[in-house]
Amino acid sequence: MNNWVTKLQKYRARIKDHEGDIHAWASLDWDFVERQVADLDSWPKSKRGPLYGVPFGVKDIFDTVDLPTTYGSEIYKGTQPVSDAASVARLRAAGAIIMGKTVSTEFAYLKPTKTKNPIDFSRTPGGSSSGSAAAVADKMIPFALGSQTAASIIQPASYCGVIGFKPTWGLISTAGVKTLASSLDTVGVIAETVGCVSDVVTILTGAPDFLNNLEIFNPPNLAILFSPEWTSASTKSLIHFSKAVSLARASGANINEGKVPVLFENLASEQAQLMAYEATRDLAYERHVYFDQLSQPLRDLFFQGEGISAKEYLSINQNRAWALCSIEELFGDSDALLAPSTVDIAPKTEEGTGDPVMSRTWTLLGLPSITLPCGYSKNGLPFGLQIACRPRDDSKLLAIAQWFERIL
Amino acid sequence: MNNWVTKLQKYRARIKDHEGDIHAWASLDWDFVERQVADLDSWPKSKRGPLYGVPFGVKDIFDTVDLPTTYGSEIYKGTQPVSDAASVARLRAAGAIIMGKTVSTEFAYLKPTKTKNPIDFSRTPGGSSSGSAAAVADKMIPFALGSQTAASIIQPASYCGVIGFKPTWGLISTAGVKTLASSLDTVGVIAETVGCVSDVVTILTGAPDFLNNLEIFNPPNLAILFSPEWTSASTKSLIHFSKAVSLARASGANINEGKVPVLFENLASEQAQLMAYEATRDLAYERHVYFDQLSQPLRDLFFQGEGISAKEYLSINQNRAWALCSIEELFGDSDALLAPSTVDIAPKTEEGTGDPVMSRTWTLLGLPSITLPCGYSKNGLPFGLQIACRPRDDSKLLAIAQWFERIL
């Protein structure tokens, strides 16, 4: 039997063993997996790239032509899209195998899901890419597609102790992905290793020149910029962050500390406003036609959004544009910024999917960002280190992340 | 009978009389129109806003839950979406009536359609919002939704002699609209009057404060900035443009002339590159699965896109970001820029849907722009005046357009 088929069967066995506890999957169809395997078997060796035969999970807000897509909502139960999302199509064309659809919160917003954190079943895996993070963390698949509008990749990946990569806004196609807030929604990858993220992004950007020469920054120039949202971070979260920083310094990194410039100080709250306005606009169909079937968190978001005028929305966009034109003020001499990925470890299930505040500003600015596990609580729950680069410096970010992967 | 129902029946009669010649519609369903009328009849007077009972056309790349949606391609013949596009949902919630789906070129790209220019059946209505422009021009409907990635609103509206408005990129929701090139795709409006455009945009942005106080700029400060693409404009097109400019000057406008700054000189060709890269990425499913069923123009676009690396794509995005940070260099003291809407009148049917070059730069920058008819050839074919404002100055742009509407 081919090596890739053996590996695939191992992942499949893992799902069969653990899915009853984890509930990471919105839909699984083993016949469909078999059909993909049969198709791939005849591919010539020359066509087989790094993702050939590699199984992956697809967040259930991505359209798939062979599996139902619910967008995390009962409204769309059993819906069968007529095409694959563009990102899914590219991965399939590279020989990757759709293992199934991973659980998403309702329309990628805050309503908790059935998915458990594989490290502690009494805790949330985070959201909205709940199933993608849990399935990768539980080694049911080596990688999954996710999406982020506030913190929906970084936060669940951090809570589950895996790599979560949110590229520069717009780099990877969002075509065929349910819109939550169009100027924030970003497709990204949750994976076991930075190298795997890199292989996936190479396929998704369609350009072999993009990431195949990961530069090694040794030592990288880094900065830590304190901003109001840091006051939400728990002491333990800051301690584990500091340990990672010390380790980086000891490994030769140059790390400056300071305060975030005034222009960037309030962007976390502006992100929340902008997200409410856009979600109210972009989910207009569901809001007008299915209001009764929406969760309270989503209704509350719409109430908030209805209170934001188009003028305020344009004014937030103006502030974002100014901030982006002053991005050098933020980065200065640094290659990347560092921060805790989340305010704390994964909360208990009944407390919701967790606070996204540590990622709001960077998402608003469309910066590429990544999370890596950087420490564990006594009970083995992970803390994450979040790294961000300038817009379009995705390649540099992955190189820096690989450097951290080695030292952490 | 209610006044709005009488008006609706007049539009409907017009469609019945003329559709056999114009072919503006991808789908029509009179029973569905009747159902909408019946629903609206019971609305209390207090809920009836300016769009109550007003029929409109929806470009066939917008999802509609009650009418099939083909995205202009045989691949999706008979496809029935599970939701309305967000923009459609908002208009319906305001009481506007979907008259039908208007013809789009294949995936809003260049393949000519069956639609005729109502002014001269031997000529194209332009593309890609072919049916939207033709139906409004033929007075089958007062307004239609369209979308623009290069010139797909401005050009057909200009060729058909109606108002075409492309707002600031991102202002109106693209949720539920088939993606052609995500960082360019913009939803807009084709209408009989600037006032009608304003009513529609007020609903689509969800904020009554946005456009209800149209300022009157008398005289407005305007600029004409010559760039390489102007060399494509025909003498007649430039003559009619100059006449409109003279009329504006005579009416008190202050109009400066100059050359476009160097930073903006090559953006038209960069727009074409970026569009090819993104279309190749965003239509990945159709490219991989249905290549044989795609038109030659679209295949050619994909061949072009495959040749553009992610690094080149990011570099174009960098240039766009720099240009946007220097937008004051472009506008200086001016409120708006003026240019011909198209290089000439609508070409003969067999020559394709026409050249989009006069709108490429402004679309790349996401500027709000509008076209108004500003003159006619001996045979009655219209020339258009194109006006653009700074990003987010949509309200000001509509005010300036109303000023031009009065003087032209």
Image: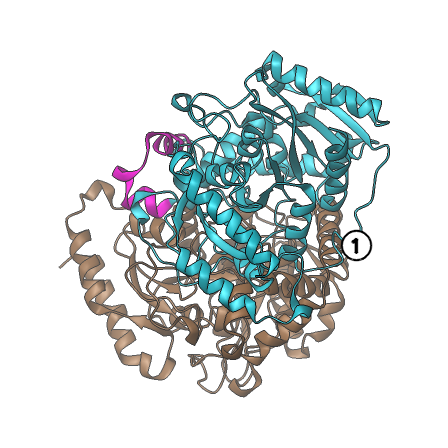
Chain colours: A brown, B cyan
The one nearer the camera, B85 or A128, is B85
Q: Secondary structure at mark 1?
A: helix
Label 1, residues with CA under 10 Å away: few <14, some 14-19, many ≥20: some
| Span of residues in magenta | B284-304
Q: Position of residue A309 (x, y in %)?
A: 73, 61
- Please name the residue shown 35% across and 70% down the image: A139
Furthest toward the top, the residue is: B235
Asked whether residue A292 is in view, the answer is: yes
Using the image, determine if residue A165 lies above or below residue B184: below
In the rendered structure, the answer to whether residue A183 lies left or right of residue B28 reads right
In the rendered structure, the answer to whether residue A98 lies left or right of residue A62 reads left
Furthest toward the front, the residue is: B1
In the rendered structure, the answer to whether residue A370 lies left or right of residue A236 reads left
Asked if the magenta segment contains residue B78, the reply would be no
Using the image, determine if residue B246 lies above or below residue A151: above
The one nearer the camera, A268 or A211, is A268
Using the image, determine if residue A125 lies above or below residue B52: below
Residue, disc 1: A263
- Quick one: quadrant of the C terminus of chain B? top right
Asked whether residue A6 is in view, the answer is: no
- Please name the residue shown 46% across and 72% down the image: A130
Tell me the quarter of the picture where residue A354 sits.
Answer: bottom right
**Disc count in the image?**
1
Q: Position of residue B120 (x, y in %)?
A: 47, 25
Tell me the quarter of the picture where residue A66 sits.
Answer: bottom left
Main SS, magenta residues:
helix
- Please name the residue shown 39% across and 39% down the image: B106
Q: Position of residue A269 (x, y in %)?
A: 72, 65
Q: Position of residue A215 (x, y in %)?
A: 51, 43
Amino acid found under the numbered disc labelled 1: Leu
Tell me the quarter of the picture where residue B123 sits.
Answer: top left
Q: Chain of mark 1?
A: A
